[in-house]
Image (cartoon, helix red, strand yellow):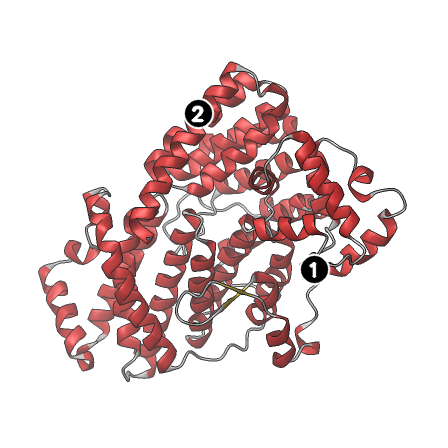
Amino acid sequence: MKDQDNGSGWMGNRLDYWMKWRGYKKYEVAEATNIPMRTLNDYCRGRTAIPRYRLEALARFLECPIAALLGEGETAQHEARARGANVVPPPQKTSPLEKGKRAQSIPSVIGESVSTPQSIIESVADISFVVPTSSSLSEFNMFMKSRRQVLQEILQVACAAITLSPYELLPKESQARLEWATTHTSYLDNAALDDLSAITASYWSLSKNASVEMLSGISGHFATLVQFLKDAHPDRSYQRLCSLASESALILGKTFHEIKEYDLAWTYYKFALKVALDSGNRDLWAAGIGRVALLLIYWGEPHHALPLLHEAQRTPPDDQRISLWLAAIEAEIHAIMGNKDTCLRLLDQTKAITLPASLADDRYWTGFDPSRAAGYEGACLMRLHQPTLALPALERAFALCEPTFPRSQSMLIADMGTIYAQLGEPKEACRFLQQALDMTMQTKSLVVVQRVCKARSELRPWKDNEDVKCLDDQITETLTALTKLKERVLV
């Protein structure tokens, strides 16, 4: 059955026409413009009006005027619709029933539908979350038991030094204490909670570079924490357990984000935010909002992150590092949307306060230090197509970046490759992008590969260049290798 023309159908036909005319597949356009495939299909079929910032991205990628996508006489009508197409109504004006009617679902992860970003954004922004019930925790526990069995296969393909459980790194006394507390929950005392905290901290440290390698261990740790939460504890112990479970869920969400399993990442982030609120840990909740915002950027829905970031900053976190990190994320979103003045104002806020280079007090691993601040500045200027200003910022970020952070280094190198492409230097661009791919084989981050693919779109004028062809071959090889590794873990 054909889609009905809702007034934007002709525009959809024009978009489809220009993609075919330029010789692009839909997945190539979706990857290059950060538009979810399902959303792009809706645009092509005329089901949804295209927001202005995405229209500009499509026109830039397809090398055609915006008017060519809209058609003569349609611009004003389309922009009027687009202004309201993705606007999230204020929470107080939307009843839960209306949310349910409007919600769409993506594949179920734990036996219940997971709402899309647009449909549950209000519930994430609303800090009056319902405390998870024991039955919902039980579902998570059963889910993780099943996944933990599946993830055993990772032990055959991952580095043993990373996949070793941090439990094994604890003193024997601590190991025995945790084993006893697992079977006798009344013995979950402060010493055992300190051990669980140390394990969680070790996973945060591993997460700065690792992705699929740590899924088996962190999922088992998360399952243990959820099991503890099902039993009765004194308030103080319960709050500590909630915070640790929330942190572990954030680490899992971050890990799934790295391998582009966005629906799974979304599920864990949602759980983490609920439990952080239950424990009364505002800083942890704000750190979770930052993770959700980054996920929405890569999911192609950056504008939906803005109300979350504003809510998180309404009562600033006690940890100043988190506040600056959230401001930097918001700056990048405004850069994506082309809001130059707002972006630069937010960047000025992040530069007004000098943070220590050490991340020793960075409990929830924002990674926001002088290097990361300069990296955000460079990324924002890159997105605003100001390469001559962006390159010095990225070079400064790389010089400040710890050598032990190869994932951060690879991200900066990929951005520098984008800058050289914008400057019209394809050979240098390919050199940087290939170096980023080499490092990505170590960190297993599909997000970095996505960044490289985005940079590759800047090299379209040189697609027949030998350096660009070699880059294409390496992108294919890297994607193939990492996809096979991910399938071993998740299928």
Spot occupied by residue 260 in the image (x, y as percentages of width and height): 45, 48
- Which residue carries the number 1 mark? 86
Q: Residue at image x 62%, y 81%?
A: 97
Disc 2 residue type?
Asp
Q: Say left or right for 326 vs 61.
A: left
Indicate whether 471 appears above or below 172. Answer: above
Q: Looking at this view, name the residue that lies furthest to the front.
A: 1
SS at badge 2: helix
Q: Say left or right for 380 vs 356.
A: right
Indicate whether 68 appears above or below 491. Answer: above
Q: Say left or right for 369 vs 95.
A: left
Indicate whether 24 appears above or below 134. Answer: above
Disc 1 residue type?
Asn
- Nearer the observer: mark 1 or 2; the answer is 2
Q: Is residue 447 visible in this depiction of the protein?
A: yes
24 or 96: nearer the eye?
A: 24
168 or 222: nearer the eye?
A: 222
Q: Quadrant of residue 422?
A: top right
Spot occupied by residue 421 in the image (x, y as percentages of width and height): 59, 24
Contact? badges 1 and 2 (CB < 8 Å): no
Q: Say left or right for 264 vs 144.
A: right
Spot occupied by residue 255 in the image (x, y as percentages of width and height): 38, 52
- Which residue carries the number 2 mark? 473
The total number of labels drawn is 2
Q: Earlier in the sequence, mark 1 or mark 2?
A: 1
